[in-house]
Amino acid sequence: MATSSHIEPGSWRIVLEATEARLTTNGRQGPRPLYAPSRLDGSFYLRPTGTLAGFDLHLPLPLPPHRFSSPRPSSPRFSSHRAEPPVLHWESAELDGDARAWLRFGSLEVCSPVSVMCAEIPGERPYVKIVLETVFWSGSLRLPGSRWLRPRPVTLRLFTEIRNAEHVRPSA
């Protein structure tokens, strides 16, 4: 991979098929999943050397059950009254040294340490593998469905790949 390929706008794409995000907590019987967002939007920022400089991600979370009581899809008012899914924002602008990330949900935000693994994988179709993990207290963001939890640590872990745009098949 040429160094310039890391800095050209639009030269990299997130491979959604190779992306998994999970929010988990520990209960009496071990790790317990809270959410597994079905998609993610946002950006990763790479330095010319290929190391991860930062990220700005948006993880849609499920709607609380009471939000599903909107008009039926056949109703003409359906699209205008449909509730948008809540979004967890996760970002960091500087991942050197004591890396920290901000998590925002609505008007609430928390800053916590973030661990980063970023590795360039060479080959015929090279890519960059990224693993991010942070831990925060459940009460600090009041995520949907977590109010019944006693305050405890929540782990947010993301695995993804970014590939050179030339090596990514267009989504159907």
Image (tube, grey):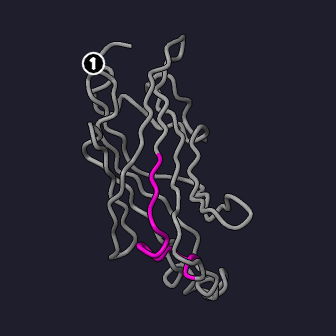
Q: Residues within 10 Å of mark 1 (few under 14, many from 20)?
A: few
Vertical order, 4 against 16 (above or below) = above
Q: Quadrant of the N terminus?
A: top left
Q: Outermost residue toward the front?
A: 28
User: Is 153 contained in the magenta span?
Assistant: no
Q: Secondary structure at mark 1?
A: helix
Q: Is residue 144 above or below residue 44?
A: below
> x, y percentage for residue 75?
63, 86
User: Left or right: 8 with respect to 39?
Assistant: left
Q: Position of residue 161 (x, y in %)?
A: 51, 33
Q: Quadrant of the C terminus?
A: top right
Residue beneath label 1, please? Answer: 4
Residue, x 40% and y 70% (percent of image)?
A: 105
Above or below for 119 versus 13: above
Between residues 142 and 153, which one lies in front from this camera angle?
A: 153
Q: Residue at x 62, y 65 (%)?
A: 34
Identify the residue at image location x=36%, y=40%.
44
Residue 81 in the image: state x and y as whole percent: 51, 85
Residue 142: within the magenta? yes
| Amino acid type indicated by mark 1 | Ser
Q: For this rendering, which residue is in front, 147 or 8?
A: 147
Instruction: Using the image as rendered, state which of residue 51 and residue 62 is in the foreground.
Output: 51
Image quadrant in which you'd find residue 62: bottom right
Tell me where the magenta segment starts and ends, as one range: 133-147
